[in-house]
Amino acid sequence: MNWFEAAILGIIQGLTEFLPISSTGHLYLGRHLFGLDEAGLFLDTMLHLGTLIAVILIYRREIVMMIRRPLSRLSLLVVVGTIPTAFIGLMFEDWFEKIAQTGMTIGWEFLATGLLLWMADTFKDKGKKSLEEISFGDAFLIGLFQGAAIMPALSRSGLTIAAALFRRIDKAAAAYFSFLLSIPSIAGAVILQGKKLMEGGTEVLPLSALMIGTACSAIFGYLAVKWMISLLKTGSLKGFAIYVFILGMVILSAQFTGTF
């Protein structure tokens, strides 16, 4: 892996982690394009670390507040939303990993993401609940949707924003809570991946390329969060829905003809 490939993969990870189009699915396609299917866990860990840095920088004040006040309503909402995500991830991790390695379901998952985004867009102007009005039931349901996004091409941000809009949460609050809830999810993924690295050794990858990939992931992740929060205030999710739907159809066609 050279620095150019690492930079492209970092940009893909940074943008698609927070845009509702699936980072894992796009990273799988990017690695496949560069012939880096065996680049391995170390690369994924470093790229996820970059997006974790980005979202921590944006929510640094909220994180400090939750650490100081662990029993505050916002802290408890994040905990409740994280519980179903953690349960699904830990219970079905091996099964989902086997599915992800084959890539056989990735086209269908992009289609499912597109359908959910299209449906959610019809709700985006109906939500009235502010952040302070989000219930623990809302948080738990959003966490369930986030857990389902462990599938390779189901977008984590897409599913959590969709779930929030389905619960009639204001679109700005939906984006805010979705990205805040991503922090323990991404941190958990980095920790689990790090544990596996220590147990099984690490791949030999150029340090300079890894640093470039991580930096690009952090920079573009930061920009993606800022842009999505702004977009949801006045924009539409249908453009993302059409994009992932077309991508899913292209992948299914390629799989049917044996070219992918």
Image: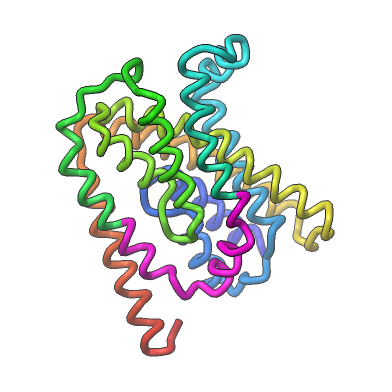
Rendering coords of residue 46 (x, y %): 67, 48
Say if 205 sits above or below 91 in the image. Answer: below
* Residue furthest bottom as drawn: 257
Q: Residue at x 31, y 18 (%)?
A: 133
Q: Is residue 219 left or right of residue 42?
A: left
* 221 vs 102, nearest the viewer: 102
Residue 43 in which image quadrant: bottom right
Looking at the rendered image, the quarter that the C terminus falls into is bottom left
* 233 vs 73, nearest the viewer: 73
Q: Residue at x 47, y 53 (%)?
A: 23
Q: Does 10 lie within the magenta span?
A: no
- Can residue 206 be spotted in the picture? yes
Q: Is residue 253 left or right of residue 225?
A: left
Rendering coords of residue 210 (x, y %): 69, 52
Looking at the rendered image, the quarter that the N terminus falls into is bottom right
Rendering coords of residue 157 (x, y %): 40, 43
Identify the main secondary structure in magenta: helix
* 50 vs 245, nearest the viewer: 245
The residue stretch that appears in magenta: 90-113
Rendering coords of residue 47 (x, y %): 61, 49
